[in-house]
Image (cartoon, rainbow, N blue to C red):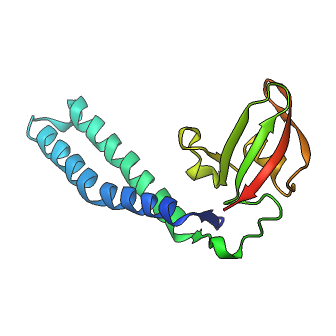
Amino acid sequence: MSKVSYYTEEGLQKLKDELEYLKTKARRDIARQIAEAKDKGDLSENAEYDAAKDAQGMLEMKIAKLEAIVGNARVLDGKNIDTSKVSILSKIKIKNNKNGAILTYTLVSEEEADLKSGKISVKSPIGKGLLGKKKGEIVEIQVPAGKLEFEILDISL
């Protein structure tokens, strides 16, 4: 049994779009590659055919995995989120007490994490360390580079 994962509407739509692409265009492309390789003769010594069949197997595994993820996905409703403490979907503004840097992150599921767009996973060291904390708290978090100390400046959606 697969575990339930929580996503934003945007994140779930991205997964559904990827799944649709894989099931349509990617499958057609692999089928075309297999047909082209078959046309080249003896299949027992045809490395191109073997590679295309391997790629097809990998594609089907990826499709099955994505179908399971999408099937067990739940969309988080921001209206039900308590902003008095840090939780998934919280937008948090934190200050690194060591260097004074102020950072803003949104806590999301592991699959949606994207540091470039300011989304960190609730399973990351910083995400785990911030979960459940309140505005004004000072949190010490163990990261691979050592211990960091953050002050939670704001929590919103």
**What residue is at 54 percent from the left and 43 percent from the top?**
117
Q: Is residue 22 left or right of residue 29?
A: right
Along the line of sight, the residue nearer the viewer: 137 or 31: 137
Picture mark count: 0
**What residue is at 19 percent from the left and 44 percent from the top?**
34
Residue 64 seen from this side = no
Residue 108 on image: x %, y % = 64, 55
- Is 30 located above or below residue 8 in the figure? above
Residue 24 on image: x %, y % = 26, 59
Residue 135 on image: x %, y % = 85, 54
* Quadrant of residue 43 within the rendered picture: top left
- Is 114 located above or below residue 46 in the figure? below
* Quadrant of residue 131 within the rendered picture: bottom right
Position of the N terminus, as image quadrant, is: bottom right
Residue 120 seen from this side = yes
Along the line of sight, the residue nearer the viewer: 95 or 54: 95
Along the line of sight, the residue nearer the viewer: 94 or 17: 94
**What residue is at 29 percent from the left and 43 percent from the top?**
53
Q: Is residue 103 left or right of residue 134?
A: left
Residue 51 on image: x %, y % = 29, 35
Q: Is residue 45 left or right of residue 122?
A: left
